[in-house]
């Protein structure tokens, strides 16, 4: 059995916009990935603990609340504290271009997909950026 | 890998998670891992939780974990969801209802896709149970995908099997799948906060009366609500009672039956693997196919001949 890419799709904080997260979760499943979806209102601690137990390759944060500049760094910090900084962090949602740049430059997110990005683009990006040996 | 096994035995959750992945992906290291952890297994009480989709299996497990934690027991949960037969992907959503203990270090929850097996569980489940057992879990709860005709595998994996029903119309007893009586050690009627479930309870009791019990254990029919928590303590009491019952009848008979099916499954896998890795490809297969084509031998004789070669085949030989 070949390796399957495992992705945790997470909705941090009080942000109730879950449409995008659900669309992504289904889309990644239909692209052959195993997607763990944990529902709304997750704390950073819950997200990191789930990522570790589920041994995912990628944590995907969906943020439409404007809280990106605290959430992404916090997740990375917690992953590091738990010796799990090898898990890749990506995201999506209404994140302004300047923030995307800053988060990527700071190493807080490997990539961020803003509204309107096609599923194909996202699937292709994950497939070519996750090591599947 | 050696490090991961050592750390697993020290209770490291990251190593447990990594080893589970390795086993799910059926990497070559798998057998070595099992060989090393096997002496450390056999301690956990393995509980299967099955039942129709949406009956409340995940919610019930979340509650049950609470009861187990109040007795300071270490808990492992394996939640299986179906993999898509088309893409091979899976949406693993049981964790949504298992958030109560997300940060408790003595609770380890792992979601798995069925990855092409039909039995309501993934092929890796048995070995993942061993990992969580060696990790130190006192109780391991397995949530299967909804019960169906071929989805009765759980009885080969669990010490105790709970069948969860809800008062919905889909759970009419008449509609209950064949085989359910054989696998249920306990029946649970969940969501008893939403409706009067006396009728369903009576139906099930009647069904139990009518079915020839192979064992001296009559499956209790319990009422629970994962919403209010009603009946959860009673469920755990009955599970402990069932475990004691099993121990008292000298578990060896059922255990060796379970082991036999496990061994057959492993052998089956190994034979298929040998076939697929071309153990027969050294011209022998072609030669025999030619003989069949020319009608010098028939397909059954050909298969027997090939099987004999296969069994005698040794790596590197
Ligand atoms: C629909 C909607 C709602 C619905 C949500 C329904 C639901 N269950 O999801 C409702 C009406 C409930 C709602 C409520 C509110 N909303 Co609203 N909402 C929107 C709206 C119009 C569309 C969002 C959407 O569903 N898009 C469709 C999905 C498919 O797109 P998406 O989520 O962006 O996902 C895509 C990408 O971002 C990316 N992606 C997203 N997540 C992920 C994750 C991963 C892992 C990856 C790889 C990719 C990825 O991929 C997707 C495909 O391209 C947006 C405006 C907008 N332009 O986005 C405002 C918007 C998000 N809402 C906004 C606000 C302010 C609110 C409210 C606070 C309004 C209020 N005052 O009450 C409330 C808050 C609710 C709450 N509890 O959080 C603001 C947020 C501003 C901000 N970020 O600072 C927005 C941007 C509108 C605006 N321009 O002001 N909202
Ligand atoms: N009223 C009530 N609702 C419940 C109860 N238990 C579960 N539910 C609800 O029933 C729905 C399904 O619950 P789950 O726990 O996800 O059920 P499940 O059997 O694990 O579902 P699948 O894994 O999808 O087969 C959810 O909306 C729960 O909130 C209960 O005891 N009472
Ligand atoms: Mg469930």
Image (cartoon, coloured by chain):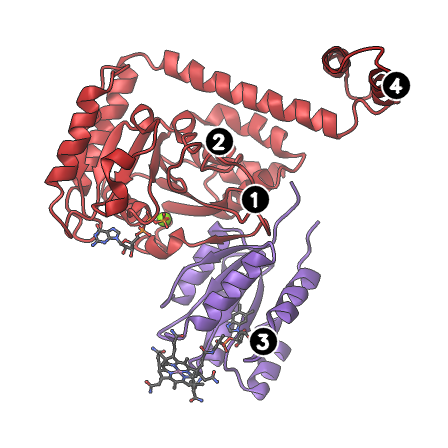
Chain colours: A purple, B red
Residue A101 located left or right of residue B274: left
Which mark, by number, is residue B21?
A: 1
Question: Local crowd at mark 3 within 10 Å, few (<14), some, or many (≥20)?
Answer: some
Question: Which comes sooner in the sequence, label 1 or label 4?
Answer: 1
Residue A37 located left or right of residue A85: left
Label 4 sits on residue: B287
Q: Which callout, 3 or 4, points to the residue nearer the camera?
A: 4
Q: Which callout, 3 or 1, points to the residue nearer the camera?
A: 3
Residue A114 is situated, as x and y percent measured from the top left of the image, at 56, 79
Residue B62 located left or right of residue B6: left
- Disc 3 and disc 1 on one polypeptide chain: no
- Distance (Cα) linking label 3 and label 4: 57 Å
Label 3 sits on residue: A113
Q: Residue furthest front?
A: B295
Residue A78 is situated, as x and y percent measured from the top left of the image, at 48, 64
Q: Nearer the viewer, residue B7 or B239?
A: B239
Q: Residue at x 22, y 15 (%)?
A: B216
- Disc 2 and disc 1 on one polypeptide chain: yes
């Amino acid at each position: 059995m070949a390796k399957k890419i495992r992705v945790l799709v997470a909705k941090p904080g009080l942000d109730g916009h879950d449409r995008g997260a659900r669309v992504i979760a289904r889309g990644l499943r239909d692209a052959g990935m195993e997607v763990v979806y944990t529902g709304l209102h997750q704390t950073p601690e819950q997200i990191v603990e789930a990522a570790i137990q589920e041994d995912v390759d990628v944590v995907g944060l969906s943020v439409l609340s404007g809280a990106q500049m605290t959430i992404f760094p916090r997740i990375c910090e917690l992953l590091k504290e738990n010796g799990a900084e090898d898990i890749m962090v990506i995201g999506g949602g209404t994140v302004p271009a300047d923030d995307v740049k800053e988060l990527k430059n700071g190493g807080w997110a490997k990539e961020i997909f803003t509204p309107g990005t096609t599923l194909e683009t996202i699937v292709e990006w994950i497939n070519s950026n996750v090591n599947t040996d | 890998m050696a490090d991961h096994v050592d750390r697993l035995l020290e209770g490291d959750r990251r190593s447990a998670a990594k080893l589970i992945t390795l086993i799910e992906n059926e990497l070559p290291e798998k057998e070595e891992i099992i060989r090393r952890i096997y002496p450390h297994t056999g301690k956990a009480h393995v509980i299967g939780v099955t039942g129709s989709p949406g009956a409340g299996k995940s919610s019930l497990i979340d509650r049950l974990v609470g009861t187990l934690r109040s007795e300071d027991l270490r808990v492992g949960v394996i939640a299986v969801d179906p993999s898509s037969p088309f893409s091979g992907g899976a949406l693993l959503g049981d964790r949504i209802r298992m958030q109560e203990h997300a940060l408790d270090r003595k609770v380890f929850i792992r979601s798995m896709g069925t990855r092409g097996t039909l039995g309501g569980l993934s092929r890796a489940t048995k070995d993942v149970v061993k990992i969580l057992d060696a990790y130190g879990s006192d109780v391991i709860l397995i949530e299967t995908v909804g019960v169906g005709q071929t989805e009765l595998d759980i009885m080969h994996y669990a010490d105790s099997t709970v069948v969860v029903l809800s008062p919905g119309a889909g759970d009419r007893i008449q509609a209950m799948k064949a085989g359910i009586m054989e696998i249920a050690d306990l029946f649970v009627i969940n969501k008893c906060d939403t409706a009067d479930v006396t009728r369903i309870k009576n139906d099930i009791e009647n069904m139990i009366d009518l079915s020839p019990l192979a064992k001296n254990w009559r499956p209790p029919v319990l009422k629970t609500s994962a919403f209010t928590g009603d009946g959860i303590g009673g469920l755990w009491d009955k599970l402990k009672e069932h475990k004691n019952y099993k121990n008292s009848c000298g578990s060896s008979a059922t255990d060796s039956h379970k082991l036999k099916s496990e061994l057959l499954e492993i052998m089956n896998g190994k034979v298929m693997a040998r076939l697929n890795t071309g153990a027969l490809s050294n011209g022998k297969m072609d030669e025999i196919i030619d003989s069949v084509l020319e009608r010098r031998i028939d397909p059954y004789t050909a298969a027997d001949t090939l099987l004999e070669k296969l069994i005698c085949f040794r790596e590197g030989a």
